[in-house]
Amino acid sequence: MSYLFVNANRSAGTINKNIYGQFSEHLGRCIYGGLYVGEDSPIPNKNGLRTDVVDALKAIRVPVLRWPGGCFADTYHWQDGIGPKEQRKTIVNTNWGGVTEDNSFGTHEFMELCGQLGCEAYFSGNVGSGTVQEFSDWVEYCNMGGVSPMADLRRKNGREQPWNVKFWGVGNEAWGCGGSMRPEYYADLCRQYATYLRTYAPDQKMVKIASGANSDDYNWTKTVMERAGGWVDAVSLHYYTLPHDDWQHKGSALDFTRAEYYTTLRKALRMDELVENHSRILRQYQGSRTVGLIVDEWGTWYDVEPGTNPGFLYQQNTMRDALVAAVSLNIFNNHCDTVCMANIAQMVNVLQAMILTEGERMVLTPTYHVFALYKDHQNARQLESYVGAALVGEGEEQVPDLHVSASQGADGAILITAANLDDAAPRTVHVVLEGAKAGAVTARVLSGAANAANDFDHPGRVAPRALAVTPTAEGFDAVLPACAVAAFRVEP
């Protein structure tokens, strides 16, 4: 039996709901066919947006959505995607598959998507191939409520009121596809661009987000904070989990060995180290201000499914991915004093997606179900939690068998999320609550073989189910199946 302690008397702060954010890039079938099918499609839609996909995403309470990239952002010129659709300029997506896009999904369509989801928008601006004027004009187009050239253009295109977009990324992966820049050069550009990202009303809020580091490039974060930290409100971090270090042969999403399973989890758990180290740098250089950490690209990245366009990054999604999501979200929850947003890559049909689509058909992935189990952590008070974990694994690939986080909502209910990373054996957990009384406890669990996946012929193979709990004087007991993610709700 493993002891799991939750201390309601100690907290790192509020878990920002935006930690449960999503990412939608013009990549493969994420936008076209995944989210957007057009008004004339036989697939049920509202203003061109797939009704089934939107309804599923609303159910997990998506708080914020990043767009249009990714690498695509630094080749995207926003004025190509506004106005009458038949007059919009076609473009070639040189980053992802070389496909031609007709720009029928642009700023207005994205804001319609955010409106239907009830979420905030996070725009990544073009620094790599754009200009300060272009970026500044985009902010004015979206946020200016008075009379101005860009506000008038927005009204001409059918939108009277400003959208008041709050989150603006100053470029993307400036160290790579966003311009192959040195940190010193990017930091100076960031200062310049941020200067011209203005608010247009006294009550408008703007969060300026610097393009941050790749993985453990701590020098990038240090240099950007030293030189541009006073001009931004947050710095991003990108980290992908790969079974193998060779980007040309990352490993299969479905056909993997036990050793690869544990390698993947070990690498996912490295997120804790990365968040802690980058957070220390932010604290060191932020001065009297608070500069947040935004992990706006994270998740698993495998070789594409056989027979699919290699530039579309389409991969299946298994219980292994569900566990990566679970431990990553636990880490973000427990670092809520610094992490103010995270955006899993990506929302539909790309990398570690919530949803897969094929024509009219739609599948919810195991990762989607983890977000559903965890959604009540949003805006809840994080609670200190720890578990007596043992190491499990294959050979040198060792990971803790249990991984947890906990929070308390405004209604007093406590949510405990726990993952059993052991692929072969269940774990009995004895939950001890300190500083809180346990009322009724309900639990749901997602479990299955490590490579269990939902597909279009078996859409419900991996789905949450009820989990039995036994009340005790200190809290409760439960048995976590092998390879499982569980959510316990403790009523006050």
Image: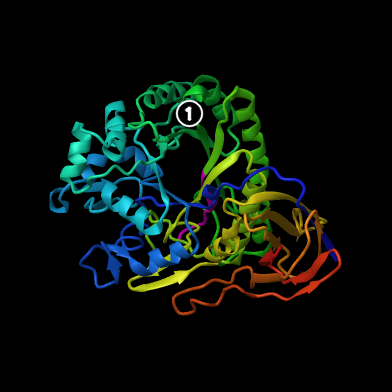
Question: Depth check: 78 or 257 in front?
Answer: 78
Q: Height in image: 274 above or below 187?
A: below
Location of the C terminus (image quadrant): bottom right
Q: Quadrant of residue 35?
A: bottom left
Q: Amino acid at mark 1?
A: Val
The residue to which callout 1 is attached is: 232
**What secondary structure is marked by label 1?**
loop
Can residue 425 be seen? Answer: no
Q: Quadrant of residue 305?
A: bottom left
Q: Quadrant of the N terminus?
A: bottom right
Residue 266 position in % (x across, y down): 68, 52
- Report if residue 483 lies within the magenta region: no
In depth, the one of 146 and 114 nearer the eye is 146
Position in image of residue 256 (x %, y %): 60, 64
- Residue 201 position (above or below residue 429): above
Q: Residue furthest bottom?
A: 457
- Residue nearest the viewer, comparing 45 with 27: 45
Is the residue 393 above or below the residue 202 in the image? below
> Measuring 53% from the left and 44% from the top, which residue is drawn there?
341
In the figure, is residue 78 to the left or right of 228? left
Residue 40, position in %: x, y? 20, 67
Q: Residues within 10 Å of mark 1 (few under 14, many from 20)?
A: many
Residue 163 or residue 400, whichever sits in front: 163
Return the x and y of residue 186 as percentages of the image width and height.
44, 25
Please report the bounds of the magenta region as a residue range: 296-306
Q: How is the image coloured?
A: rainbow
Q: Is residue 412 visible?
A: yes
Q: Residue at x 28, y 35 (%)?
A: 144
Magenta segment: does it hold 298?
yes
Point 53% across, 40% down: residue: 294
Placement of 215 over or under 368, stated as above or below: above
